[in-house]
Amino acid sequence: MVCFNLIFLVDDDPINNLINRRLLGKAGIGNQIEEFLSAQEALEKIKSIASDTSLLLFLDINMPVLNGWEFLDAYCSNFPDRKDTIVILSSSIDYQDRQKALEYPIVSGFLEKPLSLEKINTQLSTS
């Protein structure tokens, strides 16, 4: 099983973050899990993380202020050399959102909420 130094949960819903933190803890794939209620906070934190740190990031699309797409655009322009794993985790079932996610080389998957151990294991076995 893949193990990451750091896992970020970027979702404006604190309940989703709490549930996902517990699930990821059970999955045993990360040493440290951090929650962010805004995409801007997550971007700021990434600036302080060594580029060789293995980071897994679960990103919601629909958030106020800076949405998931805007986060991805900022991430790609600010951190072109990072090799993080970003997974979209969204309540969206829109096919266009799934297609748009695939246009970002940094995005390794698109999962529909709610997150489950099965979805985590399937995603990480294909990443």
Image (tube, rainbow, N blue to C red):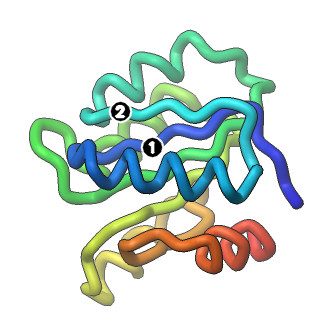
In the rendered view, tell whether residue 70 sits above or below residue 31. below
- Cα–Cα gap, marks 1 and 2: 6 Å
Q: Position of residue 119 (x, y in %)?
A: 59, 77
What residue is shown at x 76% (from left), y 27% (from top)?
53
Image mark for residue 36: 2
Q: Residues within 10 Å of mark 1 (few under 14, many from 20)?
A: many
Q: Name the quadrant containing residue 122.
A: bottom right
In the rendered view, tell whether residue 41 sits above or below residue 3. above
What residue is shown at x 30% (from left), y 51% (from top)?
68
Q: On the picture, is 38 further left or further right than 72?
A: left
Q: Residues within 10 Å of mark 2 (few under 14, many from 20)?
A: some
Amino acid, disc 2 = Phe
What residue is shown at x 33% (from left), y 23% (from top)?
41
In the rendered view, tell whether residue 63 sits above or below residue 53. below
The N terminus: image quadrant: bottom right
Q: Are marks 1 and 2 in contact (CB under 8 Å)?
A: yes
> For the residue labelled by badge 2, is the local secondary structure a helix, a strand or a loop?
strand
> For the residue labelled by badge 1, is the local secondary structure a helix, a strand or a loop?
strand
Q: Position of residue 105 (x, y in %)?
A: 59, 59
Q: Is residue 125 visible?
A: yes
Q: Is residue 81 visible?
A: no
Q: Position of residue 18 (x, y in %)?
A: 39, 46
